[in-house]
Structures are given as structure tokens and as C-alpha cells.
Amino acid sequence: MPEALTVTVVGAGGKMGMRVSANLQRGPYVTLYAETFPAARDRVTAAGRTLTDAMDAVPRSDVVILAVPDVLLGEISADIVPAAKPGAIILTLDPAAAYAGVLARRDDLHLAVAHPCHPSIFLERTSAAEWADTFGGEAAPQDVVAAIESGGAEARERAEQVVRAMYAPVLDVHWVTVEQLAYLEPTLVETITCMISGLLKEALHETVTTVGVPEAAAKAMLLGHTQVALTNSLRGSNPFSEACLIAMDYGRESIIRDDWKKVFDRSELDHVIARMLRISQVRHAAAESPAPRDPATS
Ligand SMILES: NC(=O)c1ccc[n+]([C@@H]2O[C@H](COP(=O)([O-])OP(=O)(O)OC[C@H]3O[C@@H](n4cnc5c(N)ncnc54)[C@H](O)[C@@H]3O)[C@@H](O)[C@H]2O)c1
């Protein structure tokens, strides 16, 4: 029997820390849980897990998961990285800090990032538990997008094994570069998709409060049409009607700026990530790293 991997979750009492800990606990790992904030420490112990000091846990770990706030990743990694054992994987759950070059690094460690995709709106859910699991990581299967900056096949397999366990049930793990992952999150999903979801909520509010449409009617119309609009646009399920296309053009002219695609410029990505991390500017550590552009070939 190969020796079980030792995995440490730093920030084990936070939102993601609690989620990934619950899944790792069920796997064939020696899992250690580190947490500093008193209320969060209570959450870890209330879940039946024993706390370990990060400085005791990290030197023993094959994989160290940094489930801590992104704005703290620079200072926390400065403590954790020197204590890690050679060959360990330092795994963050969001690409911003890795992209911005704020993480402490060591040549003999592997820096990885793995972000859950959350279950697809088009997932064929067959049970009440799958319907209830909108976030993923409990019952509804999801994909994960991940990046690793160095290391060969063994490091990537070790990272994928842990990533599949902590976000389980997982369908596919898509390996990309840190920069590509940063274009997925924040640009594609937070800057655009989450922003549009906020706009939908505001539009519902306007329809109800300004125009005076009964809320139940407005909600029913919005939720059903959100589903059909997404399946029409993203899967080509049905064509939009001619009148609908005219109204869609009017909406785009009225609401969307002509230059909106500038959010895909690298300078804009740098700008938003610096804002998110509350730093003056990003350092392009990802581009300067020895990582190949296509990790599938590493
Ligand atoms: N919340 C989400 O929906 C979500 C989804 C995907 C990825 N992420 C990513 O997961 C990571 C964690 O986010 P979160 O939302 O779980 O944050 P959170 O604030 O809920 O939890 C962070 C935890 O880290 C703990 N912590 C802070 N400093 C620590 C230290 N020095 N040692 C040990 N523990 C420490 C805090 O006490 C807290 O319990 C971030 O990188 C975030 O981008 C979050």
C-alpha cells in the first residue's frame, strides 16, 4: 500500500476550508486542520476535527491548501512556504494571488491553483440532494479548472488527486495556465457573469418597484426566461424570435458600452486583480515562472 498523502488545510474554519475539509476527511488522507480565528476554530472542532498548529502541520504535508482570504495570501504564504517540505504542493483556491506574484515561492515547491466551476446549470440532476447542492462539493457533480506552475507528471497527478477529493464529486479537471485561470476568474465569471446576475436582480427590482408589476409575476417571467435565454444563447436550443432579436439589439445599444471587450485586455485584468488584492500593481510572476504555457505538455 502506498503511504497516505498528508494534506493540511490552512484556514480550515472558513467557508471553503469547512467545505474542503468535510470532503478530505472522507478520503484516504492524513488531513490536518489549521485555523487562527477563534470563531472559525470553534467551527472546526464542532465538526469533529482536531486543530493543529500550521507550523507543526506544514512541514509534514505533501499538499498544503491555503483556504485563506486572498488579501492575506502574501503574508500567510511568507510564513508557510519556508516551512514546507521539499516537493510539497502549495495549493490556493483562486488564481488572483498567484497571477499577481504576491505569493512567496521556493524553487523546490510546486505552486498550484484549483478553482471549482460549480455545478452547470445544464447538469442533469436526478436527486433532491443534487438539486439542493447549487454550490457543488456535496452531491451535484462539477468540473474544476486548475493550474500548476512547475513539477512533472507526479506533482500534477498528486494535485489532481487532492483536487478531485476536496471538490468531490468532480467530473473533469481542466488544466490551464495561471493566466488563463485568471481570465476565467475574475474576468469571465465575476466581472461578466456575476455582474450580469446582479443586473438581473436590479432589473427585477425596477420592474416591481418602479413599474409596479406584481413581484410573483415578474419573478416567474424572469426565472423562466433566464433559463430559456441561456439555453438558446449557449446551447442553440431554440432560435430567438425576430422581435426578440430587435429587443436584444436595443438592450445592447442602451446598456452595453461599445468598448466592453477591453475587460479581456491584460492591463485591465491586472487592474481588477490589483483592486481585488488591494495592492498597487501586480507583478507578473506567472509569466516569469518556469512553467510551460501549456501545462498539458509538462
Ligand atoms: N467563498 C467562495 O465561494 C469561494 C469559492 C471558490 C474559491 N474561493 C477561494 O477560497 C479562498 C478562501 O476563501 P473563503 O471565502 O473560504 O474565505 P473565508 O474568509 O471564509 O475563510 C478564510 C479563513 O482563513 C482563516 N485564516 C486567516 N488567516 C489565517 C492564518 N494565518 N492561519 C490559519 N487560518 C487563517 C480565517 O480565520 C478564515 O476562517 C480564497 O482564495 C477564495 O478566493 C472562495
Image: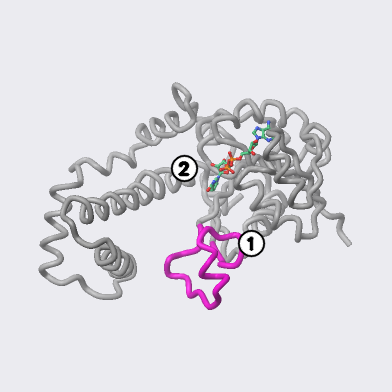
How many angstroms separate mark 1 from mark 2 (CA)? 22 Å
Q: Who comes first in sequence, dot 1 or dot 2?
A: 1
x 23%, y 56%: residue: 208
Location of mark 2 (residue) = 182
Location of mark 1 (residue) = 168
Q: Could you classify mark 2 by the number of other residues whose Cα lies within 10 Å: few (under 14), some (14-19), or many (20 or more)?
A: many
Q: Residue 206: x percent and y percent? A: 22, 51
Can you tell which quarter of the image residue 65 is in? top right
x 37%, y 44%: residue: 191
- Residue lying furthest bottom: 126
Q: Closer to us: mark 1 or mark 2?
A: 1
Magenta stretch in the rendered image: 118-142
In the image, 287 versus 3, the foreground residue is 3
x 49%, y 30%: residue: 277
Main SS category, magenta section: loop
Say which element carries label 2: helix
Q: Is residue 151 above or below residue 246?
A: above
Can you tell which quarter of the image residue 13 is in? top right
Q: Residue 236: x percent and y percent? A: 29, 71
Q: Is residue 152 above or below residue 223?
A: above
Q: In terms of image quarters, where does ligand 1 lie?
A: top right
- Residue lying furthest right: 1
Q: At label 2, which amino acid type do we have?
A: Ala
